[in-house]
Image (cartoon, rainbow, N blue to C red):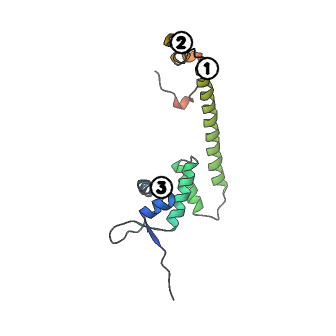
């Protein structure tokens, strides 16, 4: 009876297979997103094939803008495939709300900067609309930063 030994991959192969840099893979291991692998006699990390899929999951989640804590929760759920996906859905919906909020804020910022540049006469700095608006927030159409991001001016 023959037992097949799962293939183990050095960290460089994981980097190549996933497009994630070696230091980032080490970081993911350090913060617990990726289990520490066994080591060779020469003390090289040797990862199981499942680590490639896990890193692809992490990379895709990062590309979609998920924060590390959310990815950690999603990975925990992925490790328990028979549980309800309600929590995963909730995480994704919160992330979507954050994205939509950022889009709205960026749209407003874009409109404000567009208005500044369209109104600029380009004659002298003294009459420059961009400089005037930046010097006097009262000339803006609205607030640009949520309260949590404002600089304390006290």
Q: Please tell me the numbered disc located at residue 118.
A: 1
Q: Mark 2 against mark 1, which lies toward the viewer?
A: 2
Query: For this rendering, which residue is in front, 30 or 20?
Result: 20
Q: Is residue 21 visible?
A: yes
Q: Is residue 99 left or right of residue 20?
A: right
Q: Secondary structure at mark 1?
A: helix
Give the residue pinned by disc 3. Answer: 20
Q: Secondary structure at mark 3?
A: loop
Q: Closer to the N terminus: mark 2 or mark 3?
A: 3
Q: From mark 2 to mark 1, how far is it between C-alphas?
A: 13 Å
Give the residue pinned by disc 2. Answer: 123
Residue 71, position as x, y percentages in the image = 55, 53
Residue at left offset 34%, top offset 67%: 43
Q: From mark 3 to mark 1, how far is it between C-alphas?
A: 42 Å
Residue 30, position as x, y percentages in the image = 42, 56
Query: How many residues crowd mark 2 within 10 Å: few (<14), some (14–19), many (20+)?
Result: few
Q: Is residue 37 left or right of residue 58?
A: left
Query: How many residues crowd mark 3 within 10 Å: few (<14), some (14–19), many (20+)?
Result: some
């Amino acid at each position: 009876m023959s037992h097949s030994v799962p293939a183990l991959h050095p960290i460089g192969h994981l980097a190549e297979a996933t497009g994630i840099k070696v230091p980032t893979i080490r970081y993911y291991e350090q913060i617990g997103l990726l289990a520490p692998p066994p080591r060779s006699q020469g003390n090289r990390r040797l990862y199981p094939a499942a680590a490639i899929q896990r890193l692809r999951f992490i990379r895709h989640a990062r590309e979609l803008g998920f924060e590390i804590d959310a990815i950690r929760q999603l990975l925990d759920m992925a490790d328990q495939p028979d549980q309800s996906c309600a929590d995963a859905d909730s995480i994704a919906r919160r992330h979507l709300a954050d994205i939509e909020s950022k889009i709205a804020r960026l749209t407003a910022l874009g409109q404000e900067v567009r208005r500044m540049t369209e109104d600029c006469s380009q004659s002298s700095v003294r009459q420059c609309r961009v400089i005037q608006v930046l010097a006097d927030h009262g000339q803006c159409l609205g607030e640009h930063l949520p309260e949590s991001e404002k600089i304390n001016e006290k």
